[in-house]
Amino acid sequence: MIKLFFETLSMIVIGFVTGSFAGGLVFGQGMSGALIGGVMAALLLVLMTVLFHFKKWNKAKTKMKYASIGILPGALIGGSQLLGFGARGAIIFGISNAIIFSTLIDKMIESHVKKERYVLYNGHYFIIFLLGSIGTFVAINVIGIIDNLVDFGNLVTKLPFYLTSLIVVVAVLAIYVIEVLMKKRKLETWSQTVKASRNMLFALSGIVAVLLIATLLARLEMIPLNSLIRGVAGLVLPYGVGLFLPLSFGYLLAANKNRPVMGSVFSLIGGGLVLLVGISVAPMLLLPGSGLMWAGLIIGMFMVMLSIFSMVKPETHLFTGCSIIICSILSFIGAAGGLVVGGLLGLIGGTFIAAWDGVLSKTNFHDHDIPKGSKDIPSVNSNTIIG
């Protein structure tokens, strides 16, 4: 019953926020519409949650949860000024995103949980809804600000076409090389790796062709490049942020079993903010009385290096965690704690690293540390592939 209570509570919040947005903004009914829409959506989700719970329709309840958390991010994207579809776009994208979440995202997470790549934690659905909605909203506004500051159409048309093509091809090749190197770790030969990455190569080739054709047509003034870039960025980036940000927590928890990844990410971001403050005051470092200003650069670099070292050598987690905590405290002297946020993230990350109690991977031990005998070596046929 406790689990049902918290599930119901989270559905009340998700339903009220989503319904309020739909009633007040999408349908344009103001405060009264927001209140009515929020209450009706919350009641509907509560009734469905309780019904599915007592009927033991667990699969239906899971799909209902994923559908409910996907509506608001989709409505934010569809109703944004970047796409220009208005209220109709918010409705269409909200429904489409609910279908995507309840089918594709549900299956993806279920598959990754079975492979121990993702961890379902308490408040999983609420965190995805909260971070997904906030991330989507922030991404849309950041893209809008950049769009007002930079004329991408003018920038692209000023560059020579061969240089634009070279930049696109090099970027896509870099993505393909990273994909091949990641697959090579799981396969034995390069021919197998290239064959396994064939679909990725075809997809990237299609993307290159589309980008080059769009650039050529824009240079010939046959399509408005600014509108095209605004539409693609307003669709792809908010979706990416709205998915990556909330799902990253589950992936970090899964990776945290063998390495203190969770704490390392927190302290790495904190160290980056401290280092950013140190770089911003770098022009004043040569002035008299600027001794403490060096703290931002030095402490920020130490925090970043220790964060990376804790992931490379997880057996040193106690030393690196305590060192990051000390550096985070010192960052408030001369570096303003990385705008305060950096120092706090460093303290949290260092605490997570020092308190990490995961299991070290067997690959961290040297071969000579593990005694081997003739009984430990299995006999296999010469035509057997191991791996």
Image (tube, helix red, strand yellow):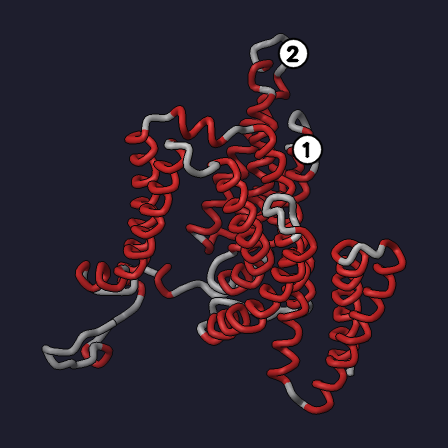
Q: Residues within 10 Å of mark 2 (few under 14, many from 20)?
A: few
Image check: 362 left or right of 38? Answer: left
**Vertical placement of 306 versus 191: above or below?**
above
Q: Residue furthest front?
A: 222
Q: Nearer the viewer, residue 37 or 383?
A: 37
- Amino acid type of disc 2? Gly
For this rendering, which residue is in front, 244 or 90?
A: 90
Q: Secondary structure at mark 2?
A: loop
Q: Which image quarter is the N terminus in?
A: bottom right
Left or right of 66 on screen, residue 384: left
Asked whether 257 or 282 is in front, the reply is 282
316 to 368, vertically: above or below: above
The residue indicated by pointer 1 is 339
- Residue 255 x/y as whole percent: 49, 61
- Location of mark 2 (residue): 289
Residue ID at (70%, 91%): 55
